[in-house]
Structure formats: structure tokens, C-alpha cells
Image (spheres, grey):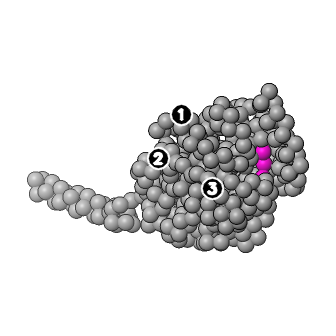
Amino acid sequence: MKKMSKVLALIMCLALVVTAFAACSNGGNGGDSQVSTNSGDSSNTGTDTPEYYKCAYLGPMTGESAQYGEVHTRAYQFAIDQINEAGGINGVPIKMDIYDDKNDAKEAVTVANKIVLDDEVLICFGPFASTVAIAVAPVFEKAGITECSPSASHVDFEFQGEYMVTGSNNQDYMQTEFAKFVYNDLGLKTTGMLCLNDDVGNNTIEVFTREYEALGGTVTKALTYNKGSSTDFTPQISSIMQDNPECFYPYGTYAEVAQIAIQARQLDFMVPMISHDSMMKDEFLSVGGDNVECFLLLTGADPNLDYAPFQEFKAAFTEKYGDVTIDSHTLHCYDQMNMFAEALREYGPDRAKINSYMRDVTDYEGVSSTYSVIGGRPQKPMFPLYVKDGTWASWTKDAWDTDWAAYVESYSA
């Protein structure tokens, strides 16, 4: 009896060893098995048809830039809902996991390293800011997952690797267009600048100055400020005013630029102001109030665009979310999610092929225009807008000249 017990014990031990060995062998990565960090379910159903196709969003969901994360996720999810309601990708829906990077580069790198552990993630949309997007680029490049920012505009972003894509024109193109618009269309030959001291702010000064002065204009003074260092911009504005520029170009977050505009008008700095399309937010208008009347933008989103696909989108989007501002970020996100859906239809859940499709698209019929993406960077038209009676109006020189003259007169009174 004792002898039989020893035999049974030996057999059981051998069985445990075999089971443990099999479990290790099935890990597939030397024991470094990949798991979803933000979802309790799995698309592995044991059949050839997955339960869903997963993407991720990495962006500012908390902190002072959270409004951009809200805009991004709302637009991506709107596109997902439309795709899924139409039957998904051959019957398979898309789902999106959302991760908060607080618009902080160090935080973003930490979170990105978690995202790439999820082997279900086929693409990651975001981050919002160029500095953050560049910081996480090596993480996604190494994992072979497309980093698809809706708004990274720094000229170096798409050159961080082979898996970088953005929805925004780069600063070289944008600032060249800004310089032409200020010099040729507005007819203003001198400009002062006050920009956030970050990658995009410094690049804005460099490229705008180069292109503007090549046309014959003069940047009278270009100053920078550090993020969060102060809410009092009057010393810098006063310094810029000393040179009597005809135009003022501030850059930063919408909250910062709204405060700059308020303080400029309080100092009776009554010249036209122009900035990036990140100002195209309801919060910018509400914070700035009368101080941002006639404020100018160049943007990829004209809310009055007479283009059938855009008007159809605008009607559906407004019906779901109310009368919110449809800015260029919204359109970039919407187009990107639909591009991802097209890549899935064409190639299925193949990360490398999805990336190849997203980085090079010819004559893509976007929601506001037809454009191409070359090497991860789109070539999109830009539209001039200005604030008229607390909302965004399409710019024409005659209308703006009339409104600007009336604004200056009313402000002086």
C-alpha cells in the first residue's frame, strides 16, 4: 500500500511538471505575456472572427489641457459609433481604450509603456502636444504600433521613426501660410510675437520670422514665456508695444492666449491679433469676451464651409453633441478614425499594414477636403477665420476691415 502511494505521488509530481512546462511554452514571449491594462475583456473568442478591433487614445483627460482630450475622444468616439452602427468592419466593431497623459511628457512615456503591453491594441491615437508626442515616439516605434497624433505639428515629429502619423500640417507649412496671410492679405508689415517657450512656440517664432521677413516684413520683437510661470503678461506686452508693431501674434494654450488678449486690450494695444487654431474653442471665446473680437486664426476647419460632406457631418455631430465648436482637432480625429477603419477593411488587424496605410494615403476624401498624407504628414488646406459677435466667421478682407474699424471705434469710446 505504501509502495503504491509512492508511485502515485511520483506520477502526480511528473504531471505537475509537464503542466507547468506547457504553460510556459504557450506564453509565446519567453514568459513576458502581454495583457490588456485598461480592459477586463478580451477579443480572443477562440474563432477566426474577433469580438472587436481595439485602438487606444493617449491624451490629456485631466489638467489644464483636458479640453483637448475631451474634443479628441468625442470626435474619435463619434466616428466609432457611426462605423459600428453601419455594421463595423465586416461585422466586427471597433472599441477604444482611453488613457490620460495629463499633457506631461514623463507621464505619457509611463502610460505608453503600459499601452504597448496590450497585444490587442492595433493603433494609438494621440498624444495632443508635439513635445509629448515626440517623447513617446520611441516606445511606439519599438512596439511597432502606429502613434497617430491628431495635432502634433512640430517639423520633427514624423521623422522620429516609421510609425508616426499626424493629422496636422507641420509648422513649416503653417507658419509660411501665416506669414503670407499677415503680409499679403492683411497688408501688415510689422509684427510682434509672444510665444510659449516650448518646441512649437520656438518653432513658430523661427519659421514665421524667416518667411515673414523674406516677404519684406519685420518681426519687431519676439518674446517667450514659460508655462505656468506667471499669469501676468503685461511686462512682455508692454515691451512689444514699444516698437509699435501693426500686428500681434501670441501663441500658447487657449487659456494663456485669452489672458494675453485681455491684458493687451487693457494696455490699449489696439492692433490685430492672430494665433494658431488651438484657440478655436468655446472656452477661448467665453474667457476672452469682447477682448478677442476680430481675433484672427488660420485653421483647417471653417465652420461655415459650403462642402456637402462637411455639412452632413456638422448636422449629425450637432444633433448628438449640441452646438459645440467644430474645430480642426475634431476634423483631424474624425478623419483619422475613418482612415483606420479603411485600413482594417483592406488589411485586417495587421499593425504593419495599418501603419503603412495611415502614413501614405493619396487623395483621401476627408470630411472638409480631399488631401493626401505623405510620410505621416497630411497636406491640408487652411482657412482664415475671425471672431465676429462672439462666434467664428469666415474671413474676407472687406468684411473684416469693416468689423475691425467698428471694433476699434467702439473700444475707444
Question: Is residue 7 visible from the viewing direction of this image?
Answer: yes
Dot placed on the residue nearer the N-terminal end, 2 or 1: 2
Give the residue displayed 73% in from the left and 45% down from the top. 272
Badge 3 vs badge 2, beta-carbon distance below 8 Å: no
Dot placed on the residue nearer the N-terminal end, 1 or 3: 3
Give percent across and percent down for residue 100. 50, 44
Disc 2 to disc 1, how far (Cα)? 23 Å
Disc 3 to disc 2, how far (Cα)? 31 Å
Give the residue displayed 69% in from the left and 41% down from the top. 281
Disc 3 vs disc 2: which is toward the camera?
Answer: 3
Dot placed on the residue nearer the N-terminal end, 3 or 2: 2
* Amino acid at dot 1: Asp
Question: Is residue 170 visible from the viewing direction of this image?
Answer: no
Read off the residue under disc 1.
232
What range is drawn magenta here? Answer: 382-386
Taking the view exactly as shown, the residue that stands out farthest to the left is: 2
Give the residue displayed 15% in from the left and 54% down from the top. 5
Disc 1 to disc 3, how far (Cα)? 23 Å
In the image: residue 226, left or right of residue 95: left
Marker count (numbered): 3
Read off the residue under disc 2.
104
Q: Is residue 100 magenta?
A: no
Give percent across and percent down for residue 278. 65, 47
Read off the residue under disc 3.
219
Give percent across and percent down for residue 162. 53, 71
Q: Nearer the viewer, residue 87 or 191?
A: 191
